[in-house]
Image (cartoon, rainbow, N blue to C red):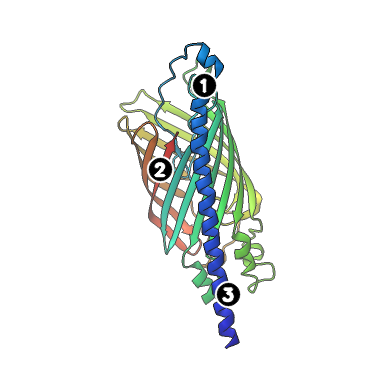
Amino acid sequence: MSGSLLVIKNKTNVKTRYNKRQWNRSRVWLAVLLLAARWSVNAEETQTNSPSAQQVPAAKPADKPAPLPLHQIEGNGGIFATLSAYIVNPPRNGESIGRPSVGFAYVNLGSDKNLEALTITESPFKRLELGYGWDHLGLGDLPLALRNAGLANYHQNEVELHNFNARFQVLKEGEFDQKWIPALTAGVHYKYNDGISEVNNETKPLTPGGALTDIAHIPNHDGTDFTLYASKLFTQLPRPVLIELGGRATKGVWEGLGGFTDNYNFVFEGNVVVFVTGNLALAAEYKQQPTGYNAIGNLVRVENDWWTIDAAYVVNKHLTLAVGYGHFGNVLNHEANGVWGITTKWEF
C-alpha cells in the first residue's frame, strides 16, 4: 500500500511541476509580446514627438519592405532550420532603430513527438540582429521505451532549449558598388537546454554517470554555436532566385535539444528560394547534422542530415505564413521522415 501511495504522490508532483511550468511559460511569453508591441509604439512616438520632428517637417518614411526573411526555429532570420545573411526588419530610412518581430513554429514529428518554437528578433542597427528562440520538444513515447528498458521511475517527458543569438552583417549585398558581392553575416548563438540534465540523471540506474554522459558522451546542457552565412539574389533568371550557403561550428546534438558534446563539429547548411510571384516563394533547404557522439541502442540513435521543402506566402507587409514538409531522419528512438510543420512571423 505504501508503494502505491508513493507512486501516486510522485505522479501528482510531476503533474503539479508540469502545470506550474506551463503557467510560467505562458506568463513569460505574454510579457514578451506586450513588450514588443510597446517597443514598436515607442519607436513611432519617438519619430513623431521629438523636438526635431516638430520643428522640421518630417521626411516621408520609406515604404516597409516585405517581411522577409522568415524566422527559423532558433530565433534567427532564415527559412525553417537554416539561416539567411539578410537581417530581419532592420531600421527603415528615417528611423533610428529597427522594430521587433515575433514568430511561432510547430512541427509534428510523429510517434507523439512535437516541436514548438517561439521566436523574437530586434535589429537595433541596420547590420545587427539580436534574437531569442524558445524551443520545446515533447519526447513522445521515449519515456515509455525507457521504462520498458528497466527505468521504472523515469518520468521526464520534455526538454526546452533557450537560444540567444547575435548576428552581424559584415557585408551588404552589392556593397562598394560591386553587384557580385553577396550579403555576408556572422553569428554567435548561446544555447541552454532546460531538461536534458534531468533526462541524464534519471538514466543513472543504467550507468553511474547517466546514459547520456557515460554511453553517448553528451555530458553538457549548454554550448555556443558560431555561424557564417552568405546570401545572393539572382535576378537574371525568369524568376528571382535566392541562394544562401553557410557553415556552423557546433557542439549541439539535434540543435542542442539532445544536449551538447565536449568537442566542436563543423557542418554545412544552406537553402535555395524561388520567388514564384511577388507574394509566394518556394524553398528547399539542407542541414548537415553532427555525429560526434554514440548511439544508446535504439533509444537514442545517431541523427541524420535534414532536408525540407517549404512554401511561404506574404500575407501583407507585416505577416508571413509558411508550411513545410521535411525529412529529419533519426529523432531519438524513431525516424521522423515525411513530417510536416507550419511557421508564421509578424513584423511590427
Label 1 secondary element = helix
- The residue under label 3 is which amino acid type? Asn
Q: Identify residue for label 3.
A: 10
Classify 207 as above or below 129: below
Gap between marks 2 and 1 measured at Cα: 32 Å
Label 3 secondary element = helix
Q: Identify residue for label 1.
A: 49
Q: Judge from the rendering whether residue 213 lies leftward or rightward of residue 248; answer left or right.
A: right
| Disc nearest the viewer among 2 and 1 | 1
Q: Residues within 10 Å of mark 3 (few under 14, many from 20)?
A: some
* Residue at the (50%, 72%) spot, across then down: 145
Q: Residues within 10 Å of mark 2 (few under 14, many from 20)?
A: many
Q: Is residue 232 visible?
A: yes
Looking at the rendered image, the quarter that the N terminus falls into is bottom right
Q: Position of residue 173 (x, y in %)?
A: 49, 23
Q: Earlier in the sequence, mark 2 or mark 1?
A: 1
- The residue under label 2 is which amino acid type? Thr
Instruction: Count all numbered tags in the image, as a single digit.
Output: 3
Classify 316 as above or below 325: above
Q: Identify residue for label 2.
A: 344
Q: Judge from the rendering whether residue 4 lies leftward or rightward of residue 310; answer left or right.
A: right
User: Viewer-proximal residue, 294 or 280?
Assistant: 280
